[in-house]
Image: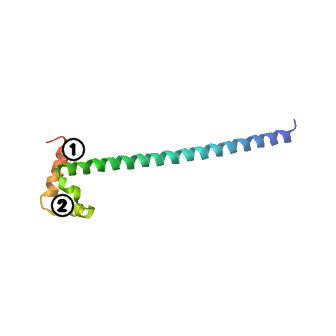
């Protein structure tokens, strides 16, 4: 086999390897994109579940909030947050709970 033939074969082999590498890169990028979207969806689902549970807890202890519109409910908490001691009391309770105190 001549040197020219060897070089042509090496070139073809290199082109084939390059094409395989591009296909592998495309598959990896596609898999990464899929996994990132799946993770985002799982995070959104977890947040939705958490919000529903917390909202359900509020409705459990204050059943009269069930019939409130979103705006009325928001204004209720806006008004409560404006009370001098409310925010401090809630923050204090959160710190106690998360810090292990009672």
Location of residue 38 in the rendering, given as x and y in whole percent from the top left corner: 46, 46
Q: Please tell me which residue is depicted at 80% across the width and 40% down the height of the picture.
A: 9
Q: Residue furthest right?
A: 2
Q: What whole-number distance in Å separates the C-alpha atoms at marks 2 and 1?
A: 21 Å
Q: Residue furthest left?
A: 85
Q: Please tell me which residue is depicted at 67% across the width and 42% down the height of the picture.
A: 20
In the picture, which quadrant includes the C terminus?
A: top left
SS of the residue under disc 1: helix
Q: Please tell me which residue is depicted at 49% across the width and 45% down the height of the picture.
A: 35
Location of residue 92 in the rendering, given as x and y in whole percent from the top left corner: 15, 50
Taking 5 as reference, is 78 above or below it? below
The residue labelled by disc 2 is: 81
Left or right, residue 23 beside residue 6: left
Q: Quadrant of residue 83?
A: bottom left
Q: Please tell me which residue is depicted at 30% across the width and 50% down the height of the picture.
A: 51
Q: Residue furthest top?
A: 1
On residue 68, which mark appears? none
SS of the residue under disc 2: helix
Left or right, residue 10 beside residue 69: right
The residue labelled by disc 1 is: 98
In the picture, which quadrant includes the N terminus?
A: top right
Q: From the viewer's perspective, is the residue at label 2 or at label 1 nearer?
A: 2
Answer with mark 2 or mark 1, whichever residue precedes in sequence: 2
Location of residue 87 in the rendering, given as x and y in whole percent from the top left corner: 17, 57
Left or right, residue 76 beside residue 35: left
Taking 100 as reference, is 61 above or below it? below
Q: Residues within 10 Å of mark 1 (few under 14, many from 20)?
A: few
Q: How many marks?
A: 2
């Amino acid at each position: 086999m001549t040197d020219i033939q060897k070089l042509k074969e090496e070139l073809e082999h290199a082109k084939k390897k390059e094409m395989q590498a591009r296909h592998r890169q495309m598959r990896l990028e596609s898999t990464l994109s899929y996994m990132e979207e799946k993770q985002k969806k799982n995070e959104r689902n977890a947040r939705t579940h958490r919000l529903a549970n917390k909202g359900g807890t509020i409705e459990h202890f204050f059943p009269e909030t069930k019939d409130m519109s979103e705006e009325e409910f928001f204004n209720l908490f806006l008004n409560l947050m404006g009370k001098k001691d409310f925010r401090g009391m809630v923050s204090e309770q959160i710190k106690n709970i998360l810090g292990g105190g009672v």
